[in-house]
Image (cartoon, helix red, strand yellow):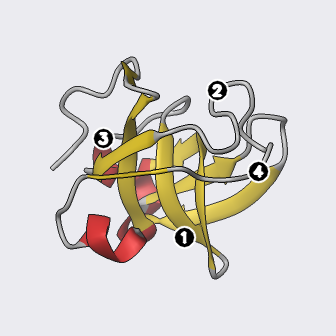
Amino acid sequence: MATRVAAGATVQFRPTGQSMTPLIRSRALVTVAPADPARVEPGDIVLARVAGTVYVHLVSAVDHANRRVQISNNHGHVNGWTGHARVYGLCTAVEGVPRPRTEGKTR
């Protein structure tokens, strides 16, 4: 999915796991569009690579000066910092329900 989103496609898929509940339940249909990483902010859900693993997780902090974001799950676990080049997409909907504050953050 990350490759397709990085190439400019908007995709839908069903991630598994409990780390994003209740925002995203396991196997819920998510829509991810290519992101403008410079515009994401804490609370946004992104498709990003952190330390070799691709996650659909929350942006928990932003470091504009160093062009990076901190990625965390919805239960307080911080996965780490990743550069803008590894923020592939922005979750724009979950089960067809639009996510708030996504306008102007996609490419």
Name the disc covering residue 49, or none: 1
Front-most of residues 94 and 60: 94
Q: Earlier in the sequence, mark 1 or mark 4?
A: 4
- Asked whether residue 67 appears in the rendered view, the answer is yes
- Identify which amino acid the numbered label 2 is placed on: Leu
Read off the residue under disc 2.
23
Farthest-out residue, bottom = 52
- Identify which amino acid the numbered label 3 is placed on: Arg
Q: Earlier in the sequence, mark 3 or mark 4?
A: 4
Q: Earlier in the sequence, mark 1 or mark 3?
A: 3
- Separation of disc 1 and disc 4 at Cα? 17 Å
- Separation of disc 3 and disc 4 at Cα? 27 Å
- Separation of disc 2 and disc 1 at Cα? 20 Å
Please say if 53 is above or below 102: below
Name the disc covering residue 17, or none: 4
State the image coordinates of residue 26 (x, y, percent, origin top left): 70, 42
Task: Determine contact: label 3, label 4, CB under 8 Å.
Answer: no
- Separation of disc 2 and disc 3 at Cα? 21 Å
- Asked whether residue 60 appears in the rendered view, the answer is no
Task: Determine contact: label 2, label 3, CB under 8 Å.
Answer: no
Name the disc covering residue 39, or none: 3
